Amino acid sequence: MRRDGNTTALVAPLKRLGRRLRQFAVTEGVSRVAVLCVALAAIQLALDRLLVLGIGPRAVLLLAICALVGRELWRRVLRPLALRVDPIQVAELVERKRPEYRDRLVSAVAFATAPGVNPHRNSPALVAEVIRGATAGDARPDTDGILRHDRYRTFVGIGIAALAFAALAVALATDTVAAYAARNWMLREVAYPSSSTIVAEGFTDGRLRWPLGDELTLLATAVDRVPRSLHAEIQYVGGDSLTRSMDRRGRNQFVADVGPLAGSLRVRFRIGKFGVDEYTRWYDVEAVPRPFVKKATIEIQPPAYARQPAYVLPQGQVSADLIRGARVRIESEMSHPVVEASLKHRADDEPAAEAEVVDGTTVRADFEPERRGTYYFAVRDATGLEDTRPVTYTLNLLNDAPPKARLSMPDVGEMVVSNATLNLSVGCEDNLGLESVELAYRIESSRNADDDATPPFQTEPLPDVAQGQLRYDLNRAWPLLPLTLQPGNRLTVKVRAKDAQPAAPATTSAPDAPPANLGESIAYTLRIVTPEELLAELGRRENEWRREFEQVVKTQEQVNRRVVDLPALAESDPAQQSARYAQEARTQRQLAGRIRTVLRQFEQIFGELKTNDLATPAVRRRLGEGVIGPLRKLLGEDLPAAGDLLDRLRAGYEPGAAAEIEALQQAILRRMYGILAEMLKWEGYNEAVALLRDMLRLQKDITEDTRKELERRIERMFESNDASLETPTPEDGP
């Protein structure tokens, strides 16, 4: 087609209008797509923020959003942008807005844009006229009012508002938008920034070393906004897991008790919020064992004076009794190396002795305990952990008891003569060994009674004492003649035994207390008397026990009479007869006990006579053979036989046994009568001897009184003569 001015004037405005229409459509599409993108992104962010979607749902949602946005982008932007501007279509649009054109504009544009005019179908003149008529007058294309500028501005504003909203979101919530983009666009596992920041107390770089078996309490602090709830999700290394609700403490702190730590674990905190809860990062708790004692050895070295070797307590025994002055060596093997150790006393938790660490895992203390009680090792390892449940070692300090000393003096009474020979029976023992044993005695005269000072004890070492021996026994005769005792003196005798324990210094509270290493027997105090005084005392005692024996004889006579009458009850009342025999058997044995007491007293008297060298042959014959010997035979043979026969008759009456008991009773009485006769002889003899000694003492006293009177008169005579010679008379001149 030939281009002329009319054609250009007709087509050019329509082309411009078409381009503007395409621009308006593309701008509207871009605005729509921008709003859609912002809206879908907001919905995606809200869903992911509230529900914390996994990577699968996020990927599906991303694909759906991309498909929807791509579809709208194609429909609203790409397709309008790819459309070619057709003047005919624009002319049709103009004619819909301008009905008065009555298709003239469309026809003119069709002729103008046609590639050529077929002269057989269309007249060129007619075509030119139509084009000319469309470009002139009322048929000229009028594009005013075709474009809606208000709608264009509205969509431009909406697009700008969507972009501004997105920019504002990026500016105000950069971290959230970045997390959203990373999670939903790049499908990465990142966390949204939380409005509640949870700080796990005690963790360093997300790690906490905690003693194995100790109570673990999780403490978390909320920074900024305090969540409505907080939970601790715990996963153990072995695979077990649990969730603990944390209790709120104060304004912004939460606590949860895990209990004794059984192993390493990791924990994270779940923040309660609207929608799906948030989670913090994982925190690791490493279970670290505290040092503890695996094996303990206690070695005890007794004091040197004990002369005993060191010994080790059996494995597992952590308590011991030991003597003061002993050294103790405690060696404990720890579970793992420690860097610091000290031995402390449980009473005040103060250091009791120095301790050393040997080879890292062995703790040793060598010390001498100064007080009893419980000790333990306070240790610390390289991580600063201590043994909070240490093994305790109980040491019970015992004072070394003084030696035990025993002294007995058989056949010695309270009174002895100056030339007596005492029989000493000495027994001493000590758990650690004796050092020395000595006889201590003190002599007090009548003059000392008026003095405040008491004479000290004199000592005499006893023979054959080996140092360290545990027991010492000695029977010895000790003559008193070398002591030159006088009647009226008091002799105190005891035995002292010492061990090797060092003597402790005397204390101010008990300055006179005996040393801890000294043991003493009971002290015997003897009064030194003349032979006459001793014989008089022994005679009094003999008379007293002779009367007791007379009562025994009378009782035996009654028993004899009753036993003789008992056979008559054999036929009349056997039960009563049996009971009577039983009663007589008891009486017979009771008499044996009384006779035994009498025998002991006479043996004591006889022994004292021998001790004091007063047992003459006549005394030995009469007292020893006439009294003590028959009493022993009576106790050893006759009375037991009588008791057995009575028991036999109690079980069943036998005429032969009844005759035998009657004969035995008569024999017992005859023996008792004989003993009593000897006692009376001995008493008469003693009275005669006492009378003779009284006469001799009286004669001695008369002779002494006569001598003193003569001396007094002679002294008076000499004094009167001296006075007459020295005193002048009135007749004497100068």
Image (cartoon, rainbow, N blue to C red):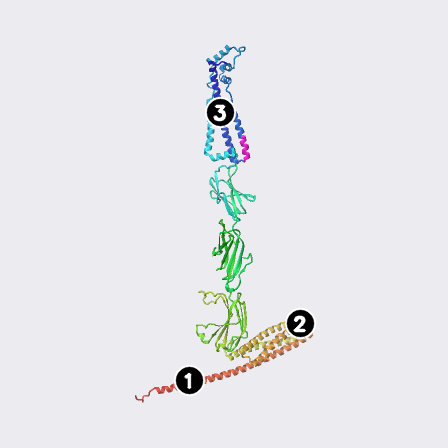
Question: Magenta span: helix, strand or loop, mainly?
Answer: helix
Question: Which residues are drawn in magenta?
Answer: 54-64
Which residue lies under the disc numbered 1?
712
Along the polypeptide, which appears first: circle 1 or circle 3? 3
Rendering coords of residue 220 (x, y %): 49, 43
Q: Is residue 590 magenta?
A: no
Mark 2 crowd level (few <14, some 14–19, many ≥20, 10 Å Cα): some
Rendering coords of residue 672 (x, y %): 61, 78
Name the residue at the left extreme.
734
Name the residue at the front extreme.
359
Amino acid residing under circle 1: Arg
Would you place residue 180 above or below residue 584 in this image? above
Front position among marks 2 and 3: 3
Contact check, label 1 and label 3, Cβ < 8 Å: no
> Label 1, label 3: how many angstroms apart (C-alpha)?
173 Å
Front position among marks 1 and 3: 3
Along the polypeptide, which appears first: circle 2 or circle 3? 3
Label 1: element kind: helix
Would you place residue 401 above or below residue 171 in this image? below
